[in-house]
Image (cartoon, rainbow, N blue to C red):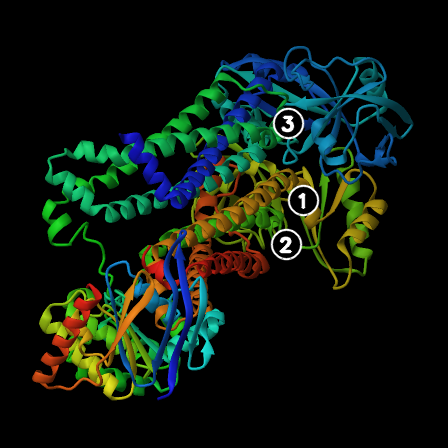
Amino acid sequence: MKTLLEVTGLAKDFDGTQVLKGVHLTVYEGEMVAIMGRSGSGKSTLLYGISGMDKPTSGSVSLFDREITSLDDDQMSELRLRHMGFVFQHAYLLHKLSVMDNIVLPGFKAGALSRDDVNQRGKALMEKTGISSVAAHDPGKVSGGQLQRAAICRALINDPDILFADEPTGALNSRATQEIMDIFNRINREGTTVVLVTHDAKVAARADRIIFLVDGLIQDELALGKHEADEQAQAAREKKIFEWLEHQGF
Amino acid sequence: MNWIIIKNDFKRNKVIHAGLLLFIIFSASLAVLSVMVATQTLTGISNLYRIAQPPHFLQMHKGELDQGAIDAFMAGQENVIDWQTVTMLNVYGDHLTIAGTREAFTLADLRLDIGLVRQNETRDLLLDAAHEKVVLGEGEVGIPVLLREMYGIEIGDRLMLSNGDVMQELVIVTFVLDSQMNSPMTSSTRILLSDHDFETLSMGVSEHEYLIEAYLNDPKEASGLKTAYENAGLPQNGPTITYAMIFVLSALTDLVTVFVMLLVSLLLIMVAFICIRFTILATLEEEIVEIGIMKAIGLSFKDQRNLYLHKYRLLAVAGVLAGYGFAFSISGFFTRHISTTFGKTTLSVSVITLSLATACLLYLLIVLYAKKILKRIRRLTVVEALVSGKGFGKEKRFEKQGLHRSRKLSVNWLLALREVYHHFRDWTILFAVVMTAVLMMLIPTHLMNTFESPAFITYMGSSLKDILIEVESGEHLETGYTKVREVLDGDPAIASYDAFRRVRVQTIDGDHQPFNIDIDVGPHAGSGLQYLTGQQPETAYEIALSYLNANEMRKAPGDTVIIFLHGEAREFIVSGVYQDVTSGGFTAKSTDVFPELASTKYAFSVSLKDGVHPESKADEWSAIIGTGVKVDPMDQYISQTLGGVVSQLRLMVIAIAIMSICLVMLLTALFMKLRLAKDVWEIAIFKAVGFSEKDIQKQYLIKMGGVALLGIVTGIMLTHVLGSRIINGALRVAGIGIRQVELIANPLVTYLMCPLLLLALVLVVTGISAGSAKRHSIISMMTQ
């Protein structure tokens, strides 16, 4: 498998406190990786560091064979726009724009497709994620699950190579969580690499591999293989994860 | 407790509070300054008038004088308490040479008639800067401050008079304050001699002019005395001036300063109020939950309101006090002209009281306005604040018109323009500041351009030509006229010229009382003037009246005016009402030549052929025609008459431009800080989805530039719409003979320099400010 993301000795300090202590991590093309850990273990900080959302204190992050820690703002923006997607725990849609406008905005900005094509793609994504009915709505007037799906559509509008997600189901109920994770699995099956942070074992069970972080370092990882839409298989994966997490002291 | 809340609030929103404070300081300082200058002007004039005692009625006359008849007339007037006749020895500017440390020069270019006088006994005194009666020794001379300002004359310079056989050298020992002739808009200026020198020179200088002065119980009745005097057939071939006219002409320059300051101060107060409204509403929206909780736990409206009001009280006190202090510290700069013209004035109780009252009034207005806005807290319910999310009923933030429908505009332009279009309220402060800056800069500039423009001649009773020649009454009147005609008829450089002569006729005023008017007559009399209503006289039975004459006679176009010629009444139809600041504003124009009447003045408006330089031509004719005739290029005529007002206005325009530039830069910087702080979350989202710093910067440049452009365009439009109205309102109050001016805009300044300067300032400051967003990572911005 081809390496997509190579993290070496990634460290991050906040006011003298070392949150990441030299993480080494490799993510392969087409993989779906879940990062787990207790609160304060540094899992979100790791995701921000490897996605270029925040500057690490030291270490290197190679994405698509490019060292992203040394990229300037223009280069990093270009990378985010055309090759990466990011989904936050909260949808973070722009309140002044409709759901549809939020989704097509990065597509318009990238300019790789005509605006008509971007709109078509936006509509297709909304249909796939089941939010076509709220396309013209004010983001303040739609449900949390619909917002999060809109955020996913926005992250996918430019057909990214890798999608980062920080607790994408953290604010959702179990049904919405299931639906969102179905979308993630579908995207992944279609070829997009996914790296997500979660504290939910059921969410992590959708990933190919789970990384467990303790005090800013990777303590262990669990390879699960590709997720299958089979209830029994899913139950077996979840059981395996629960045992593994117990072993990690989670 | 309150103090802690206020302190925290200041810390949290220090940028907007600093901006607000600045506006209060500037508006308070200008309001206080304008009141100080106005009060100082009035105090200065009243102090000068108290001691110098200018006449309430003044009739100038050249030639024979029957003092007995004047005494008999004055004695018979109930309202007259005293009178005197002052003799002036008229000399021409080219007969007077000033020599000192600099190269010697003559006063030949001075438009004003020069009169040599001696000091009066008790009334109409010429004073020094300390308001002391000037007493000169033999060989000494006192020069009016007006000439010192115009020519830079210094104490110790020598004044040499050569008038025919008379040669006299005098030393300038003082500058005198002349309470009645201290403005270039009056017709004469007086140079003070010692009694001895006056007696000596009065033998040699043959042209005497008399100032017949009267003092009244009620100075407001001066116009009544004027009519009675003129109808009594007493000496009257010169201008008649009343106390009110002396006052207006004396104070004009400083009143223009006061007017401009008041105007700018009002504009700044307006912006300060917009800032207050914006700040309060933003705070209330931000703290809606706290307000809801306070309401829910039963805190009274008054208690809640006071939590906010104390802050504005504190800001208002600090701003008004600082503004007051600032005004005091720079007042000397703006009252220099007052000290020069009216003598040294100390800060009187009235200046301090009125300026303090102004400051207090501004404080009260701010607090009352803040109270009015805070009433919204009373109307808000707990449910609106905490449950329904309705809040104060703020505008809907969501933009219905889909971005996705756009096909052409780039995303940055699209986002920025949509933001400004849909959320313009958030940008009101910048809009208001830029618009105010435009108004502040352009209205005084237009006023200055208007006073400076050659076209202003049309408000001075003449049509716009190249050269104006005037032959004033006196012994040279007819010979001067003949000489001028000879020169003009023989000069091939002339394209055309119109000749006018002035005659004085009797008519009746609005109360059917006999009333004398001066009419400029000639085939083209009244052409090319600024008519308020009607038009120039076309037939010999028509007459055009100046605005002040029309008011006095209560006549409008179409009305009949009766003119008495040798006891016979002739009817004229008023063809139009024009504006004129010359001759006290009381003139008329007719194409009838009135051959039976003697002339009191001749005037020639000359158009030169293309390529002929008016200044050199005027000099050439001046040298040929000689003394007694004023030959001036039109622009020089205006600049000498209104030069004082224009130079004071120029000073104001420069000061206001600097202030506007500083305000725009400062407010743009403060506003950008505020916006960047408010938009931090939105910026983080933009960056997270792939927008670069440059994109963000571009969006702000478009937004700020767009709003600034709107402010500039609105400012220019408002200047066009309101500028003339404001100025005309002020002119009407001033009563100087103009009611309606068309402000002259310098297109280069109005449409290019001012807009470009302001736009560039906003864009540069925005560009620099937007760069500061680079310091934050996306995540740290999102968590702010």
Q: How many residues crowd around disc 1 within 10 Å: few (fewer than 14), some, or many (20 or more)?
A: some
- Callouts 1 and 3 in the same chain: yes
Label 1 lies in what chain? B
Quarter assignment of residue B784: bottom left
Tell me, yes or no, if residue B417 can be seen here: no
Q: Amino acid at mark 2?
A: Leu
Q: Is residue B18 above or below residue B180?
A: below
* Mark sitting on residue B341: 3
Q: Nearer the viewer, residue A42 or B256?
A: A42
Q: CA distance from mark 1 to mark 3?
A: 19 Å
Do labels 1 and 2 touch, CB within 8 Å? no
Q: Is residue A55 above or below residue B31?
A: below
Label 3 lies in what chain? B
Q: Nearer the viewer, residue B262 or B54?
A: B262
Horizontal and vertical percent position of residue B583: 60, 37
Q: How many residues crowd around disc 2 within 10 Å: few (fewer than 14), some, or many (20 or more)?
A: many
Q: Amino acid at mark 1?
A: Ser
Give the farthest residue toward the left: A232
Horizontal and vertical percent position of residue B694: 47, 68
Q: From the viewer's perspective, tell me whether residue A166 is left or right of residue B445.
A: left
Mark before the other along the chain sequence, 1 or 2: 2
Q: Amino acid at mark 3?
A: Thr
* Mark sitting on residue B464: 2
Report helix, strand or loop for mark 1: helix
* Mark sitting on residue B702: none
Residue at the disc numbered 1: B639
